[in-house]
Image (cartoon, rainbow, N blue to C red):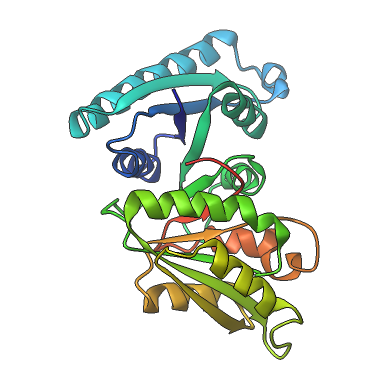
Amino acid sequence: MSSVIVVTNFTASSRNALEYACGFMRGRQVKIVLLRVFSFSSGFAGEGVSMAALTEVSAADERMLREEKERVQALYPDAQLETRLVSGQFTDALAEEVAAEETRLVVMGKEGDYNDLMSWDDHMLEAFIDLPVPALMVPASVSYAGLRRMAFACNYQREDLYGPVQTLRRLLARTGSMLHFVHIYKTGEGLPAGALEWKAKWQEELTGERVVFEELEATDVVNTLDAFSKDRDIDLLAIRPHRHGVWANVFGKNNTRAIAHLNTIPILALRGGGI
């Protein structure tokens, strides 16, 4: 059975992310794994932290996992929920769990905003950018109420969009949503040569779907996407994060980090496959 991993640190946003995942996956044969990564440095022993103290913390985490499962199971009786506590460095441990399961999606709660991050968010954002499966960041204030309008912010000319586009096609079929396929280009540069030819390719690929193609000129990518999402009543914003190439100047790590902390909308990082 395929699985969805929901990462928790027992905060309000983590609890909301689990509820969102259960609503998002309602009616599907999928296992939802509530995952807690128990991380501590090797230097703890030298700092006088006893094994007994670590065992006590681990036991407390196990108890909170059980309580959280019971709470959400009451809200979603048909959800197939499991809990799991693992130890290790966060991104490594999460990657191992993703590989061990037939993982379709990883869900995480957003903490704060871009200027007010909890320390663990650096690890969460690394996972958001680098995981080989789709990753969804959910704001604490957003409850799942269906998807009516999605947006996919991208560069028409990226050849690695084929996998994400197929994932979007599956989402469209399952939700009946409309998709805004949005190409963003830098202010003053205009559409690059060949962009319209690639646009035609994606239009042909998505023939028969409810898709609107749009081009946005942007000086500030994050603010432009934020305004666009509010203006179009977007329920979910999808991006294809990557670290290299010309497009990285617009959608590189720094912008991806800021986009992931838009506080009003869930952000989905797409790769090939998943969901």
Residue 71, located in which quarter of the rendered image?
top left
Q: Residue, x 71% and y 91% (percent of image)?
A: 188
Kindly indicate the quadrant of the structure image that contains residue 219. bottom right
**Could you tell me which residue is drawn at 62 percent across and 60 percent down?**
256
| Image quarter of the N terminus | top left
Q: Nearer the viewer, residue 153 or 38?
A: 153
Is residue 163 found left or right of 82 in the rendered image?
right
Instruction: Work out whether residue 244 or residue 207 is closer to the camera in this orientation and state it.
Output: 207
Q: Is residue 74 left or right of residue 92?
A: left
| Residue 111 visible, this angle | no
Residue 226 relative to residue 174: left or right: right
From this view, report whether residue 274 is shown above or below residue 160: above
Give percent across and percent down for residue 159: 72, 59
Expressed as whole percent of the image width and height from the top left, the position of residue 268 reads: 50, 53
Number of numbered discs visible in the structure rendering: 0
Q: Is residue 270 above or below residue 75?
A: below
- On the image, the x and y values in percent for residue 123 come to 62, 42
Q: Where is residue 29 in the image (x, y as percent from the top left)?
A: 35, 29
- Against 263, residue 213 (above or below) is below
Q: In this view, does 263 lie to the left or right of 24?
A: right
Which residue sits at x=36%, y=38%?
Answer: 18
Residue reaching furthest to the bottom: 188
Look at 32% across and 24% down and name the residue there.
80
Q: Nearest the camera: 159 or 217?
A: 159
